[in-house]
Image: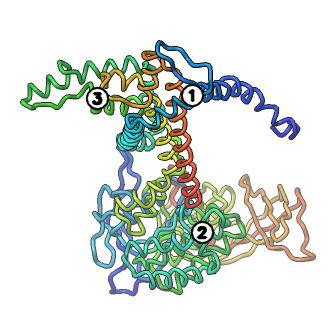
Amino acid sequence: MTQAAPGTAPHLLLDRLEKRFGTTLAVQALSLSVGRGELLGLLGPSGCGKTTTLRMIGGLMPASGGRIVVAGRDVTALPPHRRDMGIVFQNYALFPHMTVAQNLSFGLEMRKVPAAERAARVQKALEMVRLGAFAARRPRELSGGQQQRVALARALVIEPSILLLDEPLSNLDANLREEMRNEIRDIQQRLGITAVFVTHDQAEALAICDRIAVMRGGVLEQLGTPYEIYERPASEFVAGFVGRANRMAAVREASGAVQLGPLRLQGSGEAAPGPVTVMIRPHRIALCDAVPEGEGWNGATGRVARSTFIGDLLSLEVEIGGASLLVEQHTFAGRAMPRPGEAATLRWRAEDTLVFPRSAAA
Amino acid sequence: MSATPRNLLPLLVLPAVAVNLFTFLWPMLNLAGLSFREGLPGGGIGAAFSLATWGDLLADEFYLEILLRSVGMALGITGLALLASYPIAFFVHRADARWRNLLVVACISPLLISAVVRTYGWLVILGDAGFLPVILRGLGFAPPRLVFNMTGVVIGLVEILMPYMILSLLAGFGRLNQTLEEAAASLGAPPLVVFWRIVLPLTLPGILLGCLLVFVLTVSSFITPKLLGGGRVLLLATEIYDQAIVTLNWPLAAALSLIALGVFGAALLVYGRISRAAERSIA
């Protein structure tokens, strides 16, 4: 993983960045740093301020407060054409009146690169995105995925100091999306370019980002590696937004144990005694023969309320003492299919039992 | 449409074709015929086929002068109307959706008032004892004459024809997308380059349409040149009017009309040529 080595200055630094629209704060005191060659994901639901943040970094929108520093230089006041950032837009924003090659050449012309070198670099960039034969085409003669690759090549051919990607995959269909996200990741790693990737799709963020900044309501909720975000979510919101989880109200006792209806559970998390929310990911719950005893395990018996076979997954709804748990199991040939009404015994690890202070917004 | 049998579709344009045959083509042919007669003193028209009218017309440099003045003035007015309208249309296009409709209505509302009334309005403003010269003189300037000359005609026509230009430009701005400008800026283009390389080419269809409309409307306008020109600005359209109504030389008026028609045809040809070239590079 390419992260800012300890002690070296970050390549991109956001320092208490802020955006106000009238009286609403779209982005609040956002501070984070991106290391050279790192791919940082800005993840969150729509309206969380992630695109606003990206637009401020790119200079397309003035910041209301705070600083943006690139390689030690404060660029907060610079107009976009002097920031040296490559931006890939959600709708690609290819110039319709230019050929693919002219689209790529545009940024090089602005940088006064000599014509011969321009042509060579354009061709090289097109080959990088496997569109070497499409130089003379118009954008509208290309498929969505090809347009996406042209947009990426256009942003990269100028060798920007930072690559900004604004939901670049959201207009593609599911198969292409996965292929393109891997391609973006490959190219980003090969060029070692610092990149910020805005998305609302948690799977996308988990799959390709070095680190993810989860945002909510203009505030940075958690910053961490995909593993940290998924396994050690800092808040109920992050746990619910990244991956799926059963969410139940419970009470934490002074001993640290969690009382969920009639069940007494061991849980992880720092939440203080009092009302809490317990979250358990469906696929971390397993069907078993007997409730496990001892440290590190939680267990429960219940009744199957619904059983759905989805090919690679078996999805069960199990009633346990008033609460309903969603349980997902991988399938294999010969696996018994629990039927509604049957009894089921469940177990899951204590560290998969995430305990958060009960939040007002939940 | 899909329910209509394909071979019935031509029938749908039949009424329009019929109306045009009777109201345009037939009178035009009549006009052409008329120009090959001789205009007799007192408004009479010779019965026999004659090349005299065309002969006089082509031999007289006065008419060439009128033609060149008309075309030159129309080109100038088209350019000025474009310069004056483009920023307005751009602003309206960029305006918040709530305001845009209101602004469009405001832009074209002058069309609700007759061009004659608006021309008299300009006489009041620009005339020797008018609003503008009086103010200018009060400020210590010696304003040039603003009416009964080319200046007055140009000012009046530019204002009167601007709504057509604004509407055409707005229709052509559909292809413009602010993200394209942002993309160009992010690639290193300063604002003026963004305008020149991105905005202007993408709005070219609207520009061409607006220019064609204003050019044709200028060449064919005669009330405004007549009133604001005070009879001193001689143009194709005013000359046709004078020959037909004052001098009663109908064959000469007919011949001049055909020349005006030729100018329109040439304008259409140029428009088609340029917009096809533009379309090839934009589409």
Residue type of the residue flagged with mark 1 = Ser
Q: Earlier in the sequence, mark 3 or mark 1?
A: 1
For disc 1, the chain is: B
Q: Which residue is mark 1?
A: B35
Q: Is residue A337 left or right of residue B151?
A: right
Q: Position of residue A65 (x, y in %)?
A: 29, 58
Q: What amino acid is at disc 2?
A: Gln
Crowd class of label 2 (few under 14; some 14 to 19; many from 20; radius 10 Å): many
Q: Which residue is mark 3?
A: B152
- Horizontally, residue A330 falls left or right of residue A96, namely right
Can the viewer see residue A38 in this picture?
yes
Mark 1 element type: helix
Residue at the spot of label 2: A148
Q: Residue furthest left?
A: B140
Q: Residues within 10 Å of mark 1 (few under 14, many from 20)?
A: many
- The Cα–Cα distance between marks 3 and 1, rounded to whole angstroms, is 32 Å
Residue B186 higher or lower than B200, as above or below? below
Q: Position of residue A40 (x, y in %)?
A: 48, 73
**Count of picture labels:** 3
Q: Residue B32: where, in percent of width, then height?
A: 61, 29
Viewer-side label of 1, 2: 1
